[in-house]
Amino acid sequence: MKSLQVNRLSEIVHAQLLPKLQIESVNPHDPIKVRHIPHPWKLIGTGNYAAVVHHPDFQDLVVKIYAPGRDGFEEEVEVYQRLGEHPAFSQCYYAQDGFLILKRLYGVTLWDSMSLGLRIPKKVIQDIDQALDYARSRGLIPQDIHARNVMMYEGKGLVVDISDFLQKENCSKWDNLKKAYYWVYLPLIYPLKLRVPLSLLNLIRKCYRYISSFTKRLMGKS
């Protein structure tokens, strides 16, 4: 049954979605811009490389489409092949012509959780830690793990974006996010269910990116 659904969805993507979808990567460090999505498709989310969309007739599947000119499609396919089945990750059922059909993950990103004032329990952080350890055991190096790329659902942690897991450099984003969680969020924000304004979250994101870039330049000169 799943293979029949995947085949049918791939036909609809080629016939109805791709000819009318308009997406653009304006800045490689920011989420892509979605200019138009044909009815009845719905936008699930955007990343720096691709958009994730959903067709209402296929409840448990999503389609991830790379923006024109963005690399990484083949690498993401290989990552999914290495990961296989794991409860904290999606699965890839189809990959061709710059798009993937994936198992749909339900939940709220940690980014949205903070802006909505939803409590993020420690188990979510622990689940994500264990999932990243599993990825390392499969010969992968988790990259770009930030608040928009991880989710929680029914008290469990999920990893949404694995597209950069073939890169060889270690990435400190998740470690830094964990420090912020344990040092700031858990003692101050969690007990009061405070909402963190999106404007403040975006300011923190931009400052973090600037500091990281500045630090890399300094290390390159040393």
Image: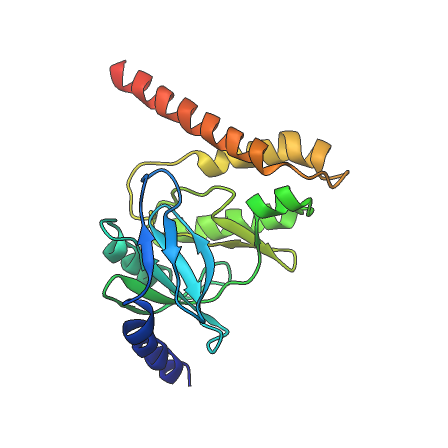
Point out the image quarter for the C terminus: top left
Say if residue 96 shows up in the picture. yes
Question: Residue 51: horizontal and vertical position, in percent?
Answer: 38, 56
Q: How is the image coloured?
A: rainbow
Residue at point 42% right, 29% down? 209
Left or right placement of residue 54 versus residue 139 in this view? right
32, above or below 82, in the image: above
Residue 133 pos. (x, y %): 45, 48
Q: Is residue 201 left or right of residue 169?
A: right
* Relative height, residue 88 to residue 39 (above, below): above
From what the image shows, is residue 198 above or below residue 157?
A: above
Residue 166 drawn at (x, y percent): 29, 48
Q: Residue at x 45, y 36 (%)?
A: 173
The total of numbered circles placed on residues is 0
191 versus 157 height, above or below: above
Residue lying at 32% horizontally and 39% vertically, measured from the top left: 27
Q: Residue at x 45, y 71 (%)?
A: 40
User: Is 8 positioned to the left or the right of 96 in the image?
Assistant: right
User: Which quarter of the figure is the N terminus placed in?
Assistant: bottom left
User: Could you say which quadrant of the image residue 210 lies in?
Assistant: top left
Judging depth in this view, the residue of 91 and 97 nearest the camera is: 97
On the question of residue 137 being in view, the answer is no
Closest to the observer: 34 or 208? 34
